[in-house]
Amino acid sequence: MTGTTPENTPDGGNLAPQPLRQYALLADGERGVIVGPRGEYAWMCAPRWDSDAVFSTLVGGTGVYLVTPVGRCVWGGYYEEGTLIWRSRWVTDDGIVECREALAFPGDPHHAVLLRRIMPCRHPARMSVALEPCAAFGRYPLRGFTRRAPGVWAGHAGDLAVRWSGRFPDPRPADGGGRRLVTEPTVEAGEYLDLVLEIGDRRLPERPPDPDALWRATEDAWHAAVPPLDGVVARTDARRAYTILRGLTGSSGGMVASATTSLPERAEEGRNYDYRYVWIRDQCYAGQAVAAAGDTALLDDAVRFVTARLHEDGPRMAPAYTMDGHVIPDERELDLPGYPGGFDRVGNKVSGQFQLDAFGEALLLLGTAARLDRLDADGWRAAEIAADTIARRGDEPDAGVWELRPRRWAHSRLACAAGLRNAAAVAPGGRAAEWSALADRLVADTAAHCLHPSGRWQRSPEDPGLDGALLLPPLRGAVPADDPRTRATLRAYVAELTEDHYAYRFRHGDQPLEEAEGAFLLCGFVTALAEHQQGREVSAFRWFERNRAACGPAGLYSEEYDVAQHQLRGNLPQAFVHALMLECAARLAGPWADG
């Protein structure tokens, strides 16, 4: 990271939103923090991912937690290898100072612990520190915040308990109301200053935690959770992608699609969505990716969450859920300015959709788990529920992978065929022949209605266009790699929906690709896999490297990438992009292998 910051005032200075590429993520599985270049915590929902925010300057709200040098500085930062421990780093007029940052890991669903350690490198550092938690997107500021013991202050913000501890000068109100508390500690070279902030929806432990013990436990937990991934290409980036997926995965096994809401995919276009929920499809993508990389821990989490949803809801399984497996609330607006170019939307309409491909992706996940001997009787019953649903509902129009107007989307049916074939290959008893036959019927029916005159797949019976999603089913085994339809689709897609090794989902009318939306990074990595499956290794690596670089300095990917401005677009970080990047890193390390 590089950049400049304005001189900071003791009350926090200007905390307007920054370009998305300048942010980093802290996460503990149960919630996340978006950290900005001035050391500001610009976004955090508490106690859980989909709770209301306590820090929300990212979308124009109030509430912030700031640690930054006093005076001029340029900033940077990096993750400690194999962790989501972030080091903010500033070069000032007087020297260099770092702030080590983390959420204590693994997280407690009811008790968030935010660790910050200020560490001057060679010279004393004078720091500006400001704390202003405001619950419910700013409706409930800090109240009753008093000194409870030397170095310990506590109070409430709405229904949340807040406690702040550390050996720093007593904080003072930055304004008459006491909403924002500030202090300016000076830390000597060779020393460090710990700040520990606790936020919970239950009574906090009697005593503040010991920061040294928490740092050691967090380091040890990350090192135990993240595998070495020695057999992949781009190992450092691949491990970072894994840490992001692990940080977004909670104790329920669910993995949220993103840490944020309402970050616009395209300025002033109204494409703002809340992704702080668990999408079945994304969860399955992540499970497939970590399995390809040789990991079973996150695979088991994905299987556990998806299996539970199939058992509970069967053919009515929703496309997405809260982390606890509940129905996602309807959309509402917050009366906040929103991130520039967007607006303030929370909740999601997705619960009312039918997405057929999710059942196919579930079968792909469960079949992969079975191959690795990770599927129990409940998992096999879930596979039967998914297959039976495809048999019953496979002809229904659905919203598809891009959540559009219901149609008989070719991708949805081919994804189901891939899932059925994958599960049939390892199915016990007599279901294998039944599932294989159903897959054959789905492919034949799709070919009868969704085969373009040129010999490639088209989006739907009514839409002859190309779609990046149609590259996925051959990768998953719906049809062979050498099937003429597979090769024709890939050839046409690269010719018509990509530019300079950036890929787009589909064409929006007559608009030039880059004017309609950003390059879709998921599709870029899928194209790399498709080229690899065809044996074109140089091309595959060109696609991989181009899209691997489309991130911010912290290594986070959003859903889309503005090629002209080299900026991230959409919510941050986007889990399924990290999943496909990881899968590419694993599969490109050797010859293509099915399954």
Image (spheres, helix red, strand yellow):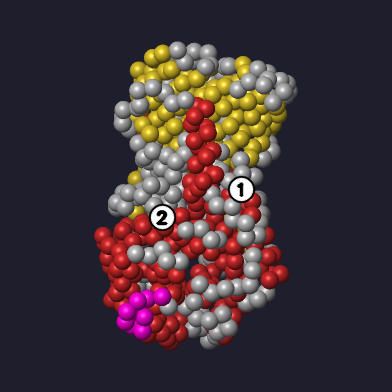
Give coordinates of residue 145: x percent, y percent: 38, 18
Which amino acid, by three-letter code, is at mark 1? Gly
Task: Decide which of 419, 575 is in the foreground and name it.
Answer: 419
Q: Position of residue 548 (x, y in %)?
A: 64, 56
Instruction: Please say whether residue 262 is visible from this viewpoint.
Output: no
Give the residue at mark 2: 301
Circle 2: residue type: Asp
Compared with residue 399, is residue 457 higher up or lower down, i.e. above or below? below
Q: Does the magenta-highlighted stretch encompass residue 286?
A: no
Mark-to-mark CA distance, 1 and 2: 24 Å
Q: Toward the viewer: 230 or 338?
A: 230
Q: Which residue is mark 1?
A: 555
The 10 Å Cα crowd at callout 2, few under 14, some 14 to 19, many 20 or more, is many
Residue density around tag 1, few if under 14, some if 14–19, many if 20 or more, within 10 Å: many
- Earlier in the chain: of badge 1 and badge 2, it is 2
Q: What is the x, y in percent for residue 337? A: 46, 38
In what quadrant of the picture does the N terminus appear? top right
